[in-house]
Image (cartoon, rainbow, N blue to C red):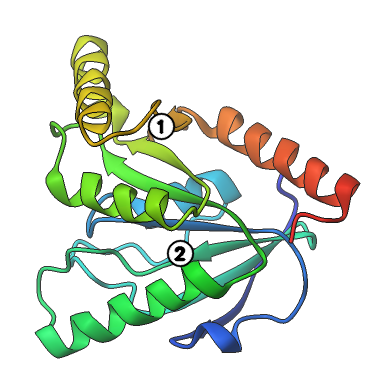
Amino acid sequence: MKITSAEFIVSNSDASKCPAEFLPEYAFIGRSNVGKSSLINMITNHKNLAKTSGRPGKTQLINHFKINNNWFLVDLPGYGYAKVSKKTKSVFQQFITDYFENREQLVCAFVLIDIRHEAQNIDIEFMSYMGESEIPFCIIFTKADKISKVKIDSHIAAYKKQMYANNWAEMPHYFVTSSTESIGKEELLTYIDEVNQEVFKNNSGF
């Protein structure tokens, strides 16, 4: 897939106010500072489509971007915020939950994980919630340029072990990426394109 257009549509904190169009949606979410904005900018060929910041928790709304006029990329707030109040955090969690559990247009979520670190409980717990709620998702490991191939393989193996220990039958589909070196870009866009084709062909993806 070649991305020829990427347009910001709306930001809000209410899943019921998301765009009414029945186009397939792909939601991107991960811990704060996982490199989500950089990844979104990389795959869409836009330097500033998603705002990047060194300050964790900067994305605090559901952000919809229309891609190629036929699907939505959805930038969601991170989980595990560093500097927001407990009250604000509970509000974030609620509207994220509302989006995942009620958004018919969502066909796949991408859970972003920093490959530099060994398996983190917060990521395992979030993916367990996704699995228990039967929300389709893939894993995107980010910042692959920061460590060696040996460590990448080791950390992925650790995630597999953790997930098997948490009653997963198999590891979810995953991608290894680097925003600075465009690693994984083609694989990710090809996957989205293939899912889109199935959705449009069946006309029953929702």
Q: Residue at x 23, y 44 (%)?
A: 124
Mark 2 secondary-structure assignment: loop
Residue 203 image offset from top left, x and y in percent: 87, 55
Residue 95 image offset from top left, x and y in percent: 39, 81
Give the residue pinned by disc 1. Answer: 177
Residue 50 is tagged as 2
Q: Nearer the viewer, residue 40 or 192?
A: 192
Asked if residue 108 is positioned above or below residue 78 in the image, the reply reads above
Amino acid found under the numbered disc labelled 2:
Ala
| Classed neighbour count for the residue bearing mark 1: other residues with Cα under 10 Å, few (<14), some (14–19), many (≥20) | many
Q: Nearer the viewer, residue 45 or 139?
A: 139
Residue 37 image offset from top left, x and y in percent: 39, 57
On the picture, is 19 further left or further right than 129?
right
Residue 106 image offset from top left, x and y in percent: 61, 61
Mark before the other along the chain sequence, 1 or 2: 2
Which tag is nearer the camera, tag 1 or tag 2?
Answer: 1
Residue lying farthest to the top in this orientation: 150
Q: Nearer the viewer, residue 189 or 155?
A: 155
- Is residue 49 in view? no
Amino acid found under the numbered disc labelled 1:
Thr
